[in-house]
Amino acid sequence: MAKKEKTAIQRIRITLKAFDHTIIDKAVQIIVETAERTGAIIAGPIPLPTKIKKYTINRSTFVAKDAREQFEMRIHKRLIDLRETTSSTIESLTNLSLPAGVDIEIKML
């Protein structure tokens, strides 16, 4: 009996981060459309938990301890998995122009 050779199925995991959820949704839409055009199988976009960073500062420099202001920064995240990718998929993903303010991480698995 001949052994079947395992072919390396190339997977790509894309993680997106942004402060504005509308910008990140536009970027996800662009990536998904590009991946569909090249024939990759798409899992996602999966919304990951939003990280909220809160900062409290005093309004005055030294007198009024009770007068404080609070600020928060929300970091929205999305995850996209691409399976059965080809070289054209990788090439088209590297040539994308995404909206400003979106941080993208691409991992080959």
Image: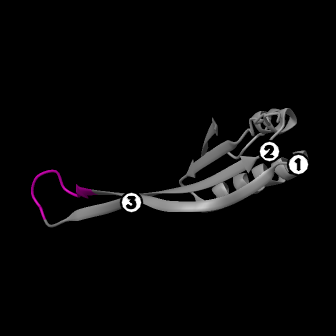
Secondary structure character of the magenta stretch overall: loop
Q: Quadrant of residue 105?
A: top right
Q: Is residue 106 visible?
A: yes
- Look at 53% across and 60% down and name the residue there: 48
Is 25 placed above or below 15 here? below
- Name the foreground residue: 60 vs 47: 47
Magenta stretch? 56-65
Q: Quadrant of residue 70?
A: bottom left
**Does residue 64 show up magenta in the picture?**
yes
In the image: residue 38, left or right of residue 72:
right
Residue corresponding to mark 1:
39
- Look at 64% across and 55% down and name the residue there: 24
* Percent of width and height locating residue 28: 71, 54
Q: Residues within 10 Å of mark 2 (few under 14, many from 20)?
A: some
**Amino acid type of the residue that numbered disc 1 sits on in the rendered structure:** Gly
**Amino acid type of the residue that numbered disc 2 sits on in the rendered structure:** Glu
State the separation of the CA atoms marked 3 and 2.
40 Å
* Percent of width and height locating residue 78: 60, 56
Residue corresponding to mark 2:
84
In the image: residue 12, left or right of residue 19:
right
Is 36 placed above or below 92 here? below
- Look at 60% across and 48% down and name the residue there: 16
Q: Residues within 10 Å of mark 3 (few under 14, many from 20)?
A: few
- Name the foreground residue: 36 vs 11: 11
- Look at 84% across and 32% down and name the residue there: 87
Q: Answer with mark 1 or mark 2, whichever residue precedes in sequence.
A: 1
**Amino acid type of the residue that numbered disc 3 sits on in the rendered structure:** Glu
Residue corresponding to mark 3:
72
CB within 8 Å, label 3 to label 1: no
State the separation of the CA atoms marked 3 and 1.
40 Å
